[in-house]
Amino acid sequence: NSPFLRLSHRPQSQILSLSSCLSHYLPLAGKLIWDPLDPKPSIVYSPNDAVSFTVAESNADFSHLSGNEAFPPSDLYPLVPELRVSDDSASAVSFQVTLFPNQGFCIG
């Protein structure tokens, strides 16, 4: 499935749906923790954790990015949210909705 959606519906309804869905998966709001003695990271959730959510706007060519023609991967970098990272942990997930005025939006 493509992360690009045409504006046939209001983005607010998809955002509320995403928010509702995430409330059932609390570990996604947690952090990946690396214990030096364990070769695998673990996900740790605490009640104050939250999922980072960014709303952005882009003047990029929506048809180009959502089409079937090849383009440099770097064209997608502004559509990908950043994860909070420290020396011993990282956010488990982060979301970004990028609006393309009068064209559509994508969820990254």
Image: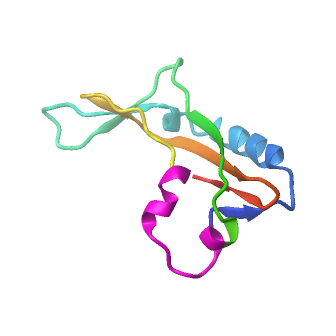
Left or right of 16? Residue 62 is left
Residue 30 lies in the magenta-colored region:
no
Left or right of 42? Residue 98 is right
Residue lying at 47% horizontally and 54% vertically, measured from the top left: 77
Residue lying at 49% horizontally and 35% vertically, measured from the top left: 27
Left or right of 77? Residue 55 is right
* Magenta segment main secondary structure: helix
Q: Which residues are magenta?
A: 64-79
Q: Hey, which residue is sitting farthest front in the picture? A: 59
The residue closer to the viewer here, 22 or 56, is 56
Q: How is the image coloured?
A: rainbow
- Residue 49 percent coordinates (x, y): 51, 23
The residue closer to the viewer here, 44 or 13, is 13
Where residue 88 sits, quadrant-wise, is top left
Residue 1 makes an appearance in the image: no
Left or right of 95? Residue 77 is left
- Residue 21 percent coordinates (x, y): 68, 43
Residue 78 lies in the magenta-colored region:
yes
- Residue 99 percent coordinates (x, y): 71, 50
Residue lying at 60% horizontally and 44% vertically, measured from the top left: 96
- Residue 8 percent coordinates (x, y): 86, 62
In the rendered image, the vertical position of residue 107 relative to residue 55, given as above or below: below
Residue 34 makes an appearance in the image: yes
In the rendered image, the vertical position of residue 88 relative to residue 21, given as above or below: above
Where residue 64 sits, quadrant-wise, is bottom right
Where residue 18 sits, quadrant-wise, is top right
Residue lying at 47% horizontally and 21% vertically, measured from the top left: 46
In the rendered image, the vertical position of residue 105 relative to residue 46, given as above or below: below
